[in-house]
Image (spheres, grey):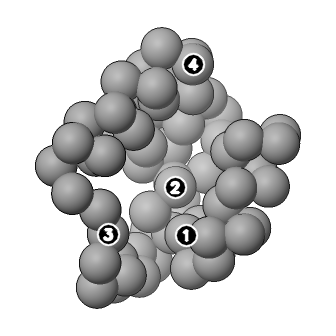
Amino acid sequence: MEQAVVPKPPKKFGNSKALALGKELYNAGSCWICHGEQATGFSGSAPDLRASPMIQSKEAWYQVVVKG
């Protein structure tokens, strides 16, 4: 199995309140079922979110996460 290359997160990634809300929504929205509990893709059927090119663009992330 190929190891995911994890890019460096953006310099400003969010405050603790936004991150806590994101975690709550991730778990409540059943995202973890496919992406795994830690969004690593381990035990899930979808890829590691840390290595997703979508995290480099707010617009792309919005289209995938919010719009589906």
Query: Around disc 2, counting alpha carbons within 10 Å, would you say few (fewer than 14), some (14 to 19), or many (20 or more)?
Result: some
Q: Is residue 40 shown left or right of residue 31?
A: left
Query: Around disc 4, counting alpha carbons within 10 Å, would you say few (fewer than 14), some (14 to 19), or many (20 or more)?
Result: few
> Can you tell which mark lies on residue 13?
3
Q: Are marks 1 and 2 in contact (CB under 8 Å)?
A: yes
Question: Can you identify the residue that label 1 sits on?
Answer: 55
Q: Give the mark nearest the N terminus, 4 or 3.
A: 3
Q: Which residue: 25% across, 36% down? A: 20
Q: Which residue: 72% across, 41% down? A: 66
C-alpha distance separating marks 4 and 3? 21 Å
Question: Can you identify the residue that label 4 sits on?
Answer: 29
Q: Which mark lies nearer to you, 4 or 2?
A: 4
Q: Amino acid at mark 1?
A: Ile
Q: Horizontal and vertical percent for residue 60?
A: 74, 67
Q: Are marks 4 and 2 in contact (CB under 8 Å)?
A: no
Q: Nearer the viewer, residue 59 or 54?
A: 59
Question: Can you identify the residue that label 2 sits on?
Answer: 49
Which type of secondary structure does the marked residue at label 2 adopt? helix
Q: Amino acid at mark 2?
A: Leu
**Up-down: is 54 above or below 66?**
below
Q: Give the mark nearest the N terminus, 4 or 2.
A: 4
C-alpha distance separating marks 3 and 1? 10 Å
Q: Give the mark nearest the N terminus, 1 or 2.
A: 2
Query: Around disc 3, counting alpha carbons within 10 Å, would you say few (fewer than 14), some (14 to 19), or many (20 or more)?
Result: few
Q: Nearer the viewer, residue 41 or 1?
A: 41
* Residue 27 visible, this angle: yes
Q: Which residue: 21% across, 42% down? A: 17
Q: Horizontal and vertical percent for residue 16?
A: 16, 49
